[in-house]
Image (cartoon, rainbow, N blue to C red):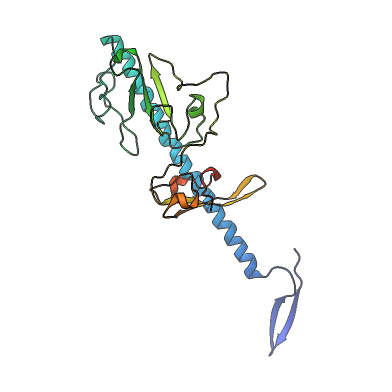
Amino acid sequence: MKHSLRNTVTHGRTKRTFESGWTLAELLIVVVIIAILAVMFLLVSWKRNIYRAQDAQRKTDVANVRRAFEEYYNDNGCYPSMDILASCEGAGLAPYINKIPCDPTTNEPYKYQPDSTTNLCMGNRVCAKLQDWADPDITTLGCHAQNGCGWGAFWNYCLATGTTVTAPGFNPDLTPTPSLTPTPAYFGPYACRPGTIAGGQVVAPGTCNNVGDPAAFGCPRSFAESDCQGLCGDSAYWCAQ
């Protein structure tokens, strides 16, 4: 937009003024708003990259445990006891694996789900909770980001030993989809208040606020963390108001 400038003389001094268009103050406000939105977007992207790096460690841990289980079976004709993964950093699976791994951020033991509690030799699954709910490996296994793979909520990444890999009811002829509508999951007072959508795209991310009662605001999920785990850039986590 063009600006027309003129000089006026006031008490012997020359003053420049804008006759039309944007004022300098208005332009500065717009620049500041754009900068804030850019920083918010970068923070969300940075947080998601951290989640993906942590998820990569979880996948590696689960794969290492599965390999250890297979080697254990080859030597013992059965799989380990149900509580074998309960001791983080323990040596219960040595020499197949030096230390039993646990979740890299919560130190929670990974889930060991035998196919039968009375016959551990039949097979099992070892599961982790991936933080990046958009990870395509979740749906490839027929799992749901929040509902999990059928062995507990949020245990959404499971590798199998001595059994089928996919979740119960998985149909290989159908393309898995994360479009299920789970019961809202409330873990704390923080939730994503709505941002802005234009042309079907998120142009301004939502904001993580303490909403008190998430159900009253129509929130699909709430968080104990004041950053809502960096998920407010995804409209699927926005509250209704």
x and y percentages locating residue 121 in the rendered image: 31, 12
Q: Nearer the viewer, residue 111 or 28?
A: 111
Would you say 28 lies left or right of 224 here?
Answer: right
Residue projecting furthest to the left: 91
Q: Residue at the location (29% across, 22% down)?
A: 97
Determine whether 5 is above or below 88 in the image.
Answer: below
Q: What residue is at 32 percent from the left and 17 percent from the top?
A: 116
- Across and down, in percent, residue 31 comes to 61, 61
Q: Camera-side residue: 150 or 78?
A: 150
Q: Quadrant of residue 77?
A: top left
Image x and y of residue 159, in percent: 41, 22
Depicted 132 relative to depicted 113: above or below: below
Q: Is residue 76 above or below residue 95?
A: above
In the picture, measured across the screen, residue 167 lies left or right of residue 29, that is left
The residue at the far front in this view is 216
Give coordinates of residue 11: x percent, y percent: 68, 90
Locate residue 200: give its quadrant.
top right
